[in-house]
Amino acid sequence: MADNNRNSQLHGKPVSRTLGEALAERGVSRRSFLKFASYTASILALPPTAATAIAEGLATARRQSVIWLSFQECTGCTESITRASSPSIEDLIFDFISLDYHHTLQNAAGDAAEHARMQAMEENKGEYLVVVDGSIPAGNNGYSTIAGMSNVEMFEETAEHAKAVIAVGTCAAFGGIPAARPNPTGAVPVSELTDKPVINISGCPPIPEAMTGTIAYLLSFAGIPELDHLGRPQAFFGEAIHDRCYRRPFYEKGMFAKSFDDQGARQGWCLYEVGCKGPVTYNACATLKWNQGVSFPIQSGHGCLGCSEPGFWDFGGFYKPLATGKDDTLKYAAGAAVAGAAIGAASAVSVRSKRKKLLEANAAPQAIKEEAE
Amino acid sequence: MELLEFARGPALMFSITVFIAGVLFRIFSLLFMWRTKDTSAAHPGQKPEIMAALSDILRRMWPLATYRQRSLFQWINGYVFHIGLFIVVFFLLPHILFINDLTGLSWGHLPNNLVYAISIVTLISLIAALIMRASNPPQRLISTFDDYFSWLVTFLPVLSGIVATMHIGARYETLLALHILSVCLLLIYIPFGKLMHFFLVFITRGQTGAHIAHRRRTTVLKGE
Ligand code: SF4
């Protein structure tokens, strides 16, 4: 049922009714609508009173046209956003937006698909949202093309008349894995290619509620939520995993798992020593969790990889503790040791020989002799 | 994150390289240094050089009676921050992991909370040391830039470490990066200033002890 609904929306027919009207027609009760609004308020860390504002905002909003562009990506972000479809919160989201273009979810293919994109852009000029997953290869346009168009071209064309851009996933937000060293495709985050407002929802993949919650916020308040210095919504990225981690007391007590199957690991001790990046990772995994709040990586026994942070792939090894340097810290150490010792010895010896010569030249008293050592 | 990347990467690599080269430079230039032979007659019954050196190292662990009253607090304070620094540097788990990653060596750690407490005592003790130095005219007179700078580069890692642990003022990764950078500064400065006593303290003390014993100064010192 829900799928049929979604599919019918993927043909890109802008709807002029308000969302309130559309939902009433579909038999969504006001009660479940309010429930949705208060859930949205809570995941956005807004006060309960904001639920009414969200409900009102959403009821009077028009369905939002969304064009979803996928570039150098793995479709994990789409997997994530679709997997969280129960308990129907995402169904509601799919009712609120008109997903006019999305490679994985749209019915149309080939020319028809591209036509849908152009049509949505024309009919909603200045009003549509562009969601991007995947980084964009700026090094060589040939690295990734869609319908004969380079990713750079397609993004720039689509973003030109967009209201705002949402960069979904770490690749779109910060370059992610494609941009990891040596970055063969010259991958860049979307923010480098547009001057439109960009909201980054990072994560590999992002938490579904972070994506849907942000879209709900945009619809309800017709504005951009408060962002952190990396352009991510504060509501989801305001706190470090470490600060909300249930293993934190073990960290403070100095009780650390030393491997993944030792006694400490079985007792649920802190995973810092096996490489957890929770202290420098900002995301809502420890609070919202995954799969409708079932668990998150640390709860499943694996340290945080730091996937929502820029450059996480190059951060020096997932299993290397955060406190250690990079692998090449001692690259020049042996050379430095030899050079230091040699220069030290050589300078002392040269001073000795200069002094000796000086003494001989001045017929220094015999009493002062160099002590050969 | 970028700052942390820089700190953990190039900054650390550079400072460790300078540190190793600098320390070995100092030690080797000292070992091969020209030494003038002392041709004066040794004090009759003088201890062998090595014994004189060892006994002076021990004796200088505690002030002479003459000065004890006046300088006892300073002495104790000196011990407090030296021992504090030792515990904080070598017994906090993240530090051990850092050393282990570089050298493969590892040993037991203390609970983080205990080390935090010790680091605060160390911080206060370091501030007290600076105040005492600056408020005592003769000490101020003999203090050089090296003294104050050595204090600063020791103080900064302690301060930034505490601030990073407590997450005060900025995000953890920024604070951690600043902590690592302050350690880089310390590493770079150690070989070139008075902090080199980290390696030389017992060598120089022993040398002084042997020298003084030979010159018969022991009798004066024994009058404590
Ligand atoms: S498991 Fe990771 S996030 Fe949790 S307390 Fe330990 S270091 Fe912090």
Image: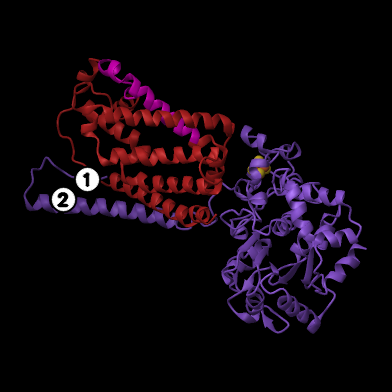
Chain colours: A purple, B red
Q: Is residue B70 within the magenta segment? A: yes
Q: Is residue A342 left or right of residue A300?
A: left
Picture layout, residue A199 above or below residue A112: above
Q: Main secondary structure of the magenta part?
A: helix
Q: Nearer the viewer, residue B194 or B55?
A: B194
CB of residue at label 2: within 8 Å of ligand 1? no
Q: Amino acid at mark 2?
A: Arg
The residue pinned by badge 1 equals B34
Circle 1: element type: loop
The CA span between labels 1 and 2 is 8 Å
- Residue A318 among magenta residues: no
Q: Quadrant of the N terminus of chain A?
A: bottom right
Q: Position of residue B35 (x, y in %)?
A: 21, 42
Chain at numbered mark 2: A
Residue B89, given in percent of the width and then of the height, sits at: 48, 37
Range of residues picked out in magenta: B59-88
- Amino acid residing under circle 1: Trp
Q: Are marks 1 and 2 in contact (CB under 8 Å)?
A: yes
* Secondary structure found at label 2: helix
Look at the picture and state if A341 lies above or below B48: below
Give the residue number, with chain letter if any, for mark 2.
Answer: A355
